Every structure is written in structure tokens, then in C-alpha cells.
Amino acid sequence: MPSRLSLYLDLIRWNRPAGWLLLLWPTLAALWLAADGFPGWHLLLVFTLGTILMRSAGCCVNDVADRDFDQHVKRTAQRPVTSGRIGVAEALAVGAVLAVAAFVLVLTTNLVTMAWSFVALLVTLLYPFAKRVVSMPQAVLGVAFSFGIPMAYAAVQGGAPWELLHNSGRLMQGGFLAAVRDSVPWQAWVLMVGNLFWVLAYDTEYAMVDRDDDLKIGMKTSAITLGQADVPAVTAFYLVYLAVWTAVLWGAVNPWIWAIVLIAALVQVVWHFTLIRDRSREGCFKAFRLNHWLGFTVFVGVALGLAV
């Protein structure tokens, strides 16, 4: 049993928390913005645990979908499903259990958040297969990794579950669409678009690590599509991400706090440029792996900017 447990932990990348941290920081920033400060322990726990669970479930689905490709990539050849140590059905069962556990957490929020969780799940399931047909599947991943933002707004501003049940008649008469509109304001969608550019930046760095292997097996990635424009494109993606978030946050948080945080974020962008400019596997992977610090920096700017 301990050996099986270690395989499951390897399957969900338990020893590589950078993956779920990349999802967590923008989600928590959205929670703080929607609540105009600390959102409360309940929502903090729901979204933190839910993020970890859904990222882990996504790893299960991704490894099953990519098992035939991963055996030709040096970095992924020893993953549990690819190496045959865990069967396809078993991996999918683990992913299903994790996804159900995440949905149980969502059930403690409200109907609007529950509805958006199904959309988020659908995009998560589509991403592994987008790599076969979409020239920049990182954009699909960007949507999946950014859905925590509108869900956070919906959880804060969409009311409690018992309120929605009490008003079920109104919801059946079109009130649900109004609840969706009111609980997910335009700022949430703009922040989501901005965050998508951040995902494009760090996942292109990730794709640059495996570019040679992906070319051999016919996998589509943004690193291949962008070609020699990959480094300037990644830098531009970072700048668009920070520009969009700055435009939304400037009137919502303390501008002095945000200005300091923005400088710190831009310093990290320059650092990432130095890591990936020679396109070495080590530099690109290090840049990807340390991206969560940029997300943490932005979250700190939001939390402190609202507190001051």
C-alpha cells in the first residue's frame, strides 16, 4: 500500500507544488478583490483545497491522454501511466475521485459557482486533446487555469446556497442569468484574459524545454508555432498580463503599494528573459518552475493594496 500511495502521489505531481501554486495565486487574488479584502476562512479553504484537487485530477487525465506521446519525451517517459506502473482505468479512477472531492467543496458555495465549475471541468478535460489540433494549445490551458477567477467572484458575490434554494422559483424564471451577470462582473473577465497571457508566457517556457522531442512526435505547442519569436513573445505575454491587471487594479488597490509590487514583478520578467534567451532546457525549465513567485508577488500586491 505505501508503494501504491507513492505511485499515486507521483501521478498527481505531489512533489512539484509549482503546478497548483500557478493556479492558486490568481484565484486568491480574485477572492480578495471580490470580497474587497479577506474573503473569510471558508472560501479560502474551499478554493485552496479545490485548486490542489483539480490540478491533481487534471494531471491524471493529462497523463492518460498523453501516454503514447510521453514515452518519446525524455522528461516524461517515466511517468506512472506512461511507464505502465499505473493502468489507464486506475489513473482515471483516481482523477474522478479527486474531481468529485473538489465538487463537494464547491457544493458549499452557491449555484452560480457550481454552474461555472462544470464549464471549468469541461475545459480541463479538453486541454490534453487540444495539443493534437490547436497550434497554440497553451491558450486552451490558459482558459482552464484562469477559471478560478470568475468562480471566485461568483462564490463571493453570488449569495449563499440556501438563499438560492429559497429563491428557486425566481431562478427558474430567468433569475439565474441575472445572478450570473451580477456575481461575475466585467472586471473578473478582464482579469481572466490578462491571466491567460501569463499562462501563455510560462507554459511556452515549459514547451520550450520539450521542443525537440515534440517536433519528432508531431505534438503542437506554442514554442513550435512561435519558432524564433518565442523569447520576445514570452516577454510580451508577461508585459500584457501585468498591463491588464494594472489597468483593472489601479483604481481598486492602493496605487503606491501596487507600483512597488509592479516594479518587483517587472524585475522578475527581466530575470526570466535572461533565463530563456539562449533557449537551454535548464534555463527554460527553471523559468517555468519559478513562475509561481511572480503570481505570489501579484497576490501580495492585491492583498496589501486592499488592506492599506
Image: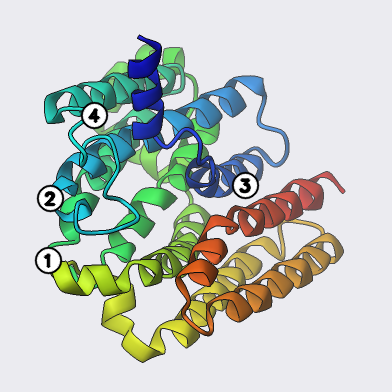
Q: Residue visible at 31% across and 73% down?
A: 211
Quarter of the figure with the N terminus: top left
Q: Residue visible at 17% across and 68% down?
A: 134
> From mark 1 to mark 3, how far is it between C-alphas?
33 Å
- For marks 3 and 4, give the one nearer the viewer: 3
**What crowding class fits label 3: few (fewer than 14 Cα within 10 Å), some (14-19), or many (20 or more)?**
many
- For marks 2 and 4, give the one nearer the viewer: 2
> From mark 2 to mark 4, how far is it between C-alphas?
48 Å
| Dot 2 or dot 3, earlier in sequence | 3
What x and y, as percent, mark residue 225? 26, 80
What x and y, as percent, mark residue 198? 50, 65
What amino acid type should be assigned to the residue bearing mark 1? Val
Q: Which residue is mark 3?
A: 29
| Dot 1 or dot 4, earlier in sequence | 1
> From mark 1 to mark 2, how far is it between C-alphas?
16 Å
Q: Which residue is mark 2?
A: 68
> From mark 2 to mark 3, how far is it between C-alphas?
37 Å
> From mark 3 to mark 4, how far is it between C-alphas?
33 Å
- For marks 1 and 2, give the one nearer the viewer: 2
- For marks 2 and 3, give the one nearer the viewer: 2
| Dot 2 or dot 4, earlier in sequence | 2
Residue 195 to residue 144: above or below: below
| Dot 1 or dot 2, earlier in sequence | 2
Would you identify the image quadrant in which residue 84 lies?
A: top left
What x and y, as percent, mark residue 227? 32, 86
Q: How is the image coloured?
A: rainbow
| Dot 3 or dot 4, earlier in sequence | 3
Numbered tag placed on residue 173 in the rendering: 4
